[in-house]
Structures are given as C-alpha cells and as structure tokens.
Image (spheres, rainbow, N blue to C red):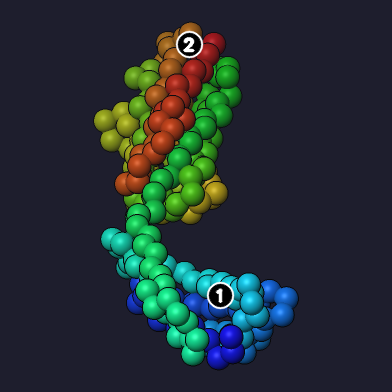
Amino acid sequence: VTGVEIIDTLPDALQNVSWTCTASAGSSCSASGVQNGNVNTMVNLSPGGTATITVQAKVKSTASGTITNTAYLSSPIDPVANNTQASDSTVITAPVIESDLRVEVISPGTVITGTTFTMTVTVTNLGSSTATNVVFTQQLHPGTEFVLTVPGSPTCTHAGGTVACNLGNLASGASIQIKVVLIPRPAVLGLIYFQSGVTANENDPNGSNNTVTTSVLIT
C-alpha cells in the first residue's frame, strides 16, 4: 500500500515534541531523521510490513489529570474501516517533593572549664528537591554561656538558651556550616548535652537524621 497518511496531533499538555518514523524491510517512511511537532507523514507498506512512529515529549509542569492521545491513519486501500484510529491515556501525577535534611555536629569532646569551645554544625540536603525555609535550632545546656555564632545575626540568633538559624533554601546535595561558640559556666563539671535539629517546609522521608544529641565533657 502506498500513500498511507498518519496524523497525530499531540495533546497541549506536552512540550518539546519530536518524533521519528522507522519502517520494516520493504516498507518506507517519507519522513527521515528527527521531526519536530505534531505527526503528519506518509508511509508506504509492503504486504505484512510495518511503520513505527516514536514520539518523545516532555509533560508541562502545569499538566494534571489524564492525557489522551489519538493517532489516525488514512489509506487508499483499507477494507476494514474501524481500525483507522487508536487512543491511549496516561494519568499525570504530581512529582514527589522531598528534602532529606541531615544535621551533624562536631564537638571538641573534652573542654577545660573556663575556656571557650566551638561546636561545628553541618546541615546537608540529601533529598532530590530543594529544601525551603530551612531552620536549624540548638538547645544549649544551662551550664554554658553563649558567646557567638558564625554566621551571626540576623541569620543566627540566641535567646533563652536556644540558638536558631534561618538558613533559607538549600539545594539538593548542598550543605551549609554553622559554628556555635560557648563557654562553660563556673563550677560546671562532667558531661553536658546539647540537642540540635533541622526542619524545612518539604516532607522529609527520613526523620532520623533531623536531630542529634551531642555531649561535651567539662574537666
């Protein structure tokens, strides 16, 4: 059969549409190489031959619901009239937005009373999406006095024994470091503990690494 027309007007929910046509031995496509936009081409088919149209496209970020695509053919010779079109539907689901935040704290381990010490905090986004409105908090032990943070105000502030840092957005795979400088209060000896945590607007599939307890031995 010569002069078989294939038409496929792609749904508006798709963008960056391209397509190719390949035919079996003895058959042929009028279009060669990669074509852009809707499909509108002619093919010639030998007995038992096939022509395959392969479409590549990107779903628009605003797309939702069900996308239905229908392809049509028109042939000068076709005794069966009810098989000249075919449709296929795909349900569009919203992408899962997750940010797996991890907080790590490195402390000096042992501190001589009356001397300042620094805890180095690293917040990392292990998730696949940008974490927004990232907030780090650390509950200070009452046996310590706050000295400073790096970065300082307005990013990080201290009030009522709590350090709070508004870190903004953190891209996937990115990290940010905070330093908290403290000094033990007089007569404080032994192990003291600090609770640190991090939050963001997005769902976090692994909450176990959002908080950490750190100990320091004052001698």
For residue 178, which numbered disc appears in the image?
none
Position of residue 131 in the picture relative to residue 123 (left or right): left
Amino acid at pointer 1: Ile
Mark 1 nearby-residue class (10 Å; few <14, some 14–19, many ≥20)? some
Residue at horizontal 41 percent and vertical 36 percent from the top = 205
- On the rendered structure, is 72 left or right of 121? left
What residue is pinned by disc 2? Answer: 191
Q: Position of residue 190 (x, y in %)?
A: 48, 8
Secondary structure type for disc 1: strand
Count neighbours of disc 2 (C-alpha within 10 A) and say few if under 14, some if 14 to 19, many if 20 or more: few
Report the front residue among 163 and 147: 163
Percent of width and height locating residue 61? 37, 66
Indicate which label's residue lies in the foreground, 1 or 2. Answer: 1
The residue at 59%/89% (across/down) is 2
Location of residue 87 with respect to 215 vertically, above or below: below
Q: Is residue 119 above or below residue 174?
A: above
Quarter of the image for the N terminus: give it.
bottom right
Left/right of residue 53 with respect to residue 146 in the rendered view: right
Q: Quadrant of the C terminus?
A: top right
Q: Residue at x 38, y 68 (%)?
A: 87
Looking at the picture, tell me which residue is in the foreground, 180 or 77.
Answer: 77
Q: Which mark is residue 53?
A: 1
- Position of residue 78 measured from the top left corner of the image (x, y, whole percent): 47, 82
Q: Residue at x 49, y 18 (%)?
A: 215
User: Which quadrant holds residue 146?
Assistant: top left
Q: Work out whether residue 23 can be spotted.
A: yes
Rendering coords of residue 21 (x, y %) = 61, 79
Question: Which of 34/60 is in front?
Answer: 34
Amino acid type, residue under disc 2 in the picture? Leu
